[in-house]
Image (cartoon, rainbow, N blue to C red):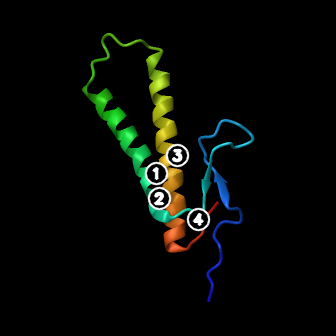
Amino acid sequence: MQTPNPFPDRYRAIKSSATDSSPMVIDTQADPHDLIEAALQRNRASANLLETLHCMSFKDADVQDIPHITHALYLLTQDGCDLLQVAQQRMLGWKAPV
């Protein structure tokens, strides 16, 4: 018995996209191991950046750096979460609530 495809469309837009046309997408038919590896890369980069910030002194930092850093952390973390959600759905064969 064939399980239903949890994704009506092959390509899912990432949530961090700031445009209407969604130029960055996740291939929902990609190997789940590849999806997990891509997610891990983004989550590791985010964690490494947070660790660096934790060890730094902000005494001499520029206030303009804060939005730049938080935006980079948001992009990395959100993309990693989106990739993990697709990998989880592929591996478990379930559809997440909208």
Badge 3: how crowded within 10 Å, few (<14), some, or many (20+)? many
* The one of 34 and 57 positioned closer to us in this rendering: 34
How far is disc 4 from disc 2 in space, using C-alphas?
Answer: 20 Å
Q: Is residue 70 above or below residue 95?
A: above
- Residue at the spot x=44%, y=62% of the render? 33
Amino acid type indicated by mark 2: Asp
Viewed as shown, does residue 48 lie left or right of 65? left
Q: Identify the residue position indicated by label 1 in the image.
A: 38
Answer with mark 2 or mark 3, whichever residue precedes in sequence: 2
Q: Identify the residue position indicated by label 4 in the image.
A: 96
Whether tag 2 and tag 1 are in contact, CB under 8 A, the answer is yes
Q: Identify the residue position indicated by label 3 in the image.
A: 79
Q: Identify the residue position indicated by label 2 in the image.
A: 34
Answer with mark 4 or mark 3, whichever residue precedes in sequence: 3
Where does residue 54 sit, x and y in percent of width and height?
28, 29
Amino acid type indicated by mark 3: Asp
